[in-house]
Amino acid sequence: MRNYKLIYYLLLITSVLVCGCHGGEENEVFKKEPQLILSVDRIEAGKTLTLSIDNVPLDKISSVNWVWGDGEVSDAVEGTHQYTLPGNYLILASVVFVDGDVVMCKGNVEVYLPELSGNERLSIPLSLKNKSHIQICAHRGYWKEAPENSLKAVELAIKSQIDIIELDVRMSKDEKLVLMHDASIDRTTNGKGTIAKMAYSDLKSYYLYHNLDLTSERIPLLSEILLMARGKIYLDLDVKISNYKLVYDMVKQHGMLSQVMFTVYDTDVAEGLFKMDREIIMLPVIYSMEDLENYLAIGASLCVIQFNTKAFTKEILAKAFDNGISAFKNIYINSDVTPNSDGFKQVDSFVAKQGNVIQTDFPLELKEYLELNYGK
């Protein structure tokens, strides 16, 4: 009899344990290790990005607080967002569980603008095929009326319908791409210091001079210039840092590769750029026939070359023209000679040699002179 009772109690205990293991999902234990799932990691500005939380039961989540990295926030279990500006954004998601615990997870997304089409604005190579028009490039922007390398200098060049602006790119200590010709800010701002040793938060606290007058203009980011110039004016970027890739990536992100030239001073840099992108628009600077031949040997599809005065000869020009290359030259730059003091003789010589692009400190004067005297 005792054996029967023992068996009965053992069966009773077993049934209770089994029921306890399979009943009441509310007591189910799970790891609070949410994963952020992005619909894509690269998206066009204006398109909808969708994010969701994975790796945890959704019924255990009370809410998700999203911080999108562009100043916007939202609150929903599944997040959707549209970015208006290109850039690389860090997304933070605070996952709030029903028991009150909060776990943070994060993700990254690149937002880009589509490359400008020919219907919006011709690419630089296509624009140079129009030999009836000589293009004007404003050196450091329209700096006669605004601080050099400033947003205002770019704005004035656009309003004056100048074809191209030349700008200088440097990098701050925290890897922000900014516009500045000199390595330091001493000459052009009311501050002092070396750009490469200063954070952008410090750089933007200073104001730019125009001649001797302090203005309200600040040191601009390259991204600001790209947005302002997009579809309105071509850019010639004189990259003052070794990391061309960083500059290239930003130009690409803004959909401006067909609108931007990269000035290069040696064939090693040119080869590196060509390997990075066979369609990149380079502006090599040459001083001799040998320089021209060295750049041609790279195999890149060159559409324009900047000629030093010594290289601006009939022989070297003829070889460039035979290879479908347009001629770009500096006229009245960093010189006491002005168009008026020279009687525009340098312009007349440039036209006679069938040059295509003039870079100058006097963009409006040369533009008006060419239109009036040559219809170009």
Image (cartoon, grey):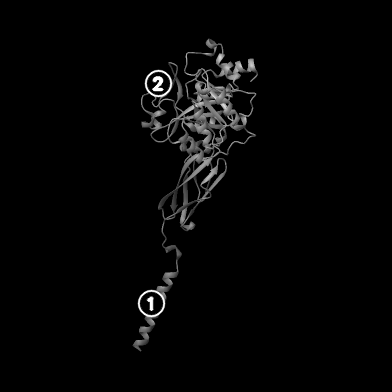
Residue 13 is tagged as 1
327 or 141: nearer the eye? 327
Percent x, y of residue 311: 51, 23
**Vertical arrangement, residue 63 with respect to residue 301, above or below:** below
Residue 312 is tagged as none
Q: Which residue is identified by label 2?
A: 187
Percent x, y of residue 251: 52, 35
Rendering quarter of residue 259: top right
Percent x, y of residue 66: 47, 46
Q: Amino acid at mark 1?
A: Ile
- Residue at 53% of width from left, 38% of height from top? 252
Quote the CA–CA distance across marks 1 and 2.
88 Å
235 or 333: nearer the eye? 333
- Residue at 41% of width from left, 59% of height from top? 31
Q: Is residue 81 visible?
A: no
Q: Residue furthest bottom?
A: 1
Percent x, y of residue 223: 49, 33
